[in-house]
Image: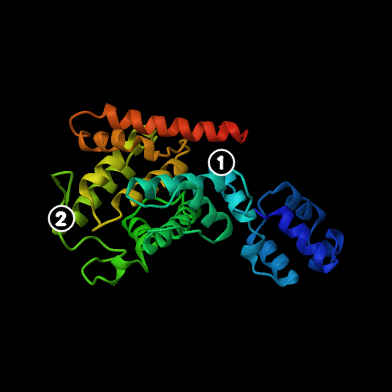
Amino acid sequence: MISYDILEKTLKNRGIGKTELSTHLGLSTRTIAKIGKGEKLSNRSLQKIADYLGVDVKILMKEVSENKILQVLREEKEMKLPGGLYHELQVRMTYNSNHIEGSKLSEDQTRLIFETNTIDVGDGIPIDDILETVHHFRAIDYVIDIAEDELTEDIIKHLHYILKHDTKDSTLEWFAVGDYKKRANVVGGRETSKPSDVHKHMMALLKEYNFKGNVTVEDIIALHAEFEYIHPFQDGNGRVGRLVALKECLRHGVIPFIIEDAKKNYYYRGLSEWRNEKGWLTDTCLDGQDTFKKLMDMLEIQY
């Protein structure tokens, strides 16, 4: 649909009224009225308006999602609104997800980077911790932008690229930033998918998952666990996996979950025991969902 606010601002900046717009373009008053209601216009009418105003037709378009949480995140992201859901998701998820993986940055330092693009590093903060914090902000932006797309290997690989490019790991030829691992790895003493099997295992996982009808939070938790069992990348699997879970929650209208660093041991135990006992990881993720609900309640956002 056309964004009424953007059109109004564009007309005002050019000193053009909607009546004048209608007259010059030969559009009916009914067509003009549709704009304010956010009703669909023909491609021909859209292009005529954009050409007359001298703007790209995409600028006049506003993507509206039926998912309340996703819509709020997109609007606040576009507005760069401080202190809202988008702001807090960026800071809290980035801090917790990176800290689970060993980042030395505090939540206050993470918040400072997001809010001011500066950092009081103190002593002993690795450069990669700072880079991966900024990269995680961009990865969340990417997730919000493509949330409603079907999950694919390309999306997952791109998330890995966003997180790991320009880091020390990217200087290692064998590391394969933005691509599947080239060397076998072990997690908690458990063997993961061999490099030669990763593509096959990922294709099977995505085929089974994307075939599901009404996806639930339990389905997304299962996707996350099985992704971590494959462990497709040389490093960064936990962060990519949690970003994928965020994307799929937004895609299917499920309240997202944020795994807090304080719950790391429960989270790791849940992943380790997933194929024997699903309840531990499920409970930890549902606790993370409660964390997100509390954030929404604090911001008075309905869900």
**Label 1, label 2: how far apart the Cα atoms are:** 38 Å
Q: Give the residue type that dot 2 points to.
A: Asp
Q: Nearer the viewer, residue 178 or 30?
A: 178
Question: Residue 110 in the image: x percent, y percent?
Answer: 48, 52
Secondary element type, mark 2: helix
**Residue 100 is at least partly visible in this image:** yes
State left or right for residue 94 relative to residue 70: left
State left or right for residue 17 relative to residue 181: right
Question: Residue 47 in the image: x percent, y percent?
Answer: 67, 66
Q: Quadrant of residue 287?
A: top left
**Residue 67 is at least partly visible in this image:** no
User: Would you call the spot at circle 2 few (<14 residues within 10 Å), some (14-19), or many (20 or more)?
Assistant: few
Q: Which residue is pictured at 64% across the width and 50% down the height?
A: 81
Q: Which residue is pictured at 37% across the width and 69% down the height?
A: 166
As displayed, is residue 253 above or below residue 104? above
Q: Nearer the viewer, residue 189 or 11?
A: 189
State left or right for residue 185 relative to residue 112: left
Residue 66 disc label:
1
Question: Residue 241 in the image: x percent, y percent?
Answer: 33, 48
Q: Nearer the viewer, residue 100 or 39?
A: 100
As displayed, is residue 161 above or below residue 91? below
Give the mark toward the camera: 1 or 2. 2
The count of marks equals: 2
Q: Earlier in the sequence, mark 1 or mark 2?
A: 1
User: Would you call the spot at circle 1 few (<14 residues within 10 Å), some (14-19), or many (20 or more)?
Assistant: few
Residue 229 disc label:
none
Q: Which residue is pictured at 36% across the width and 66% down the height?
A: 165
Residue 197 disc label:
2
Q: Give the residue type that dot 1 points to.
A: Glu
Quadrant of the drawing holding the C terminus:
top right
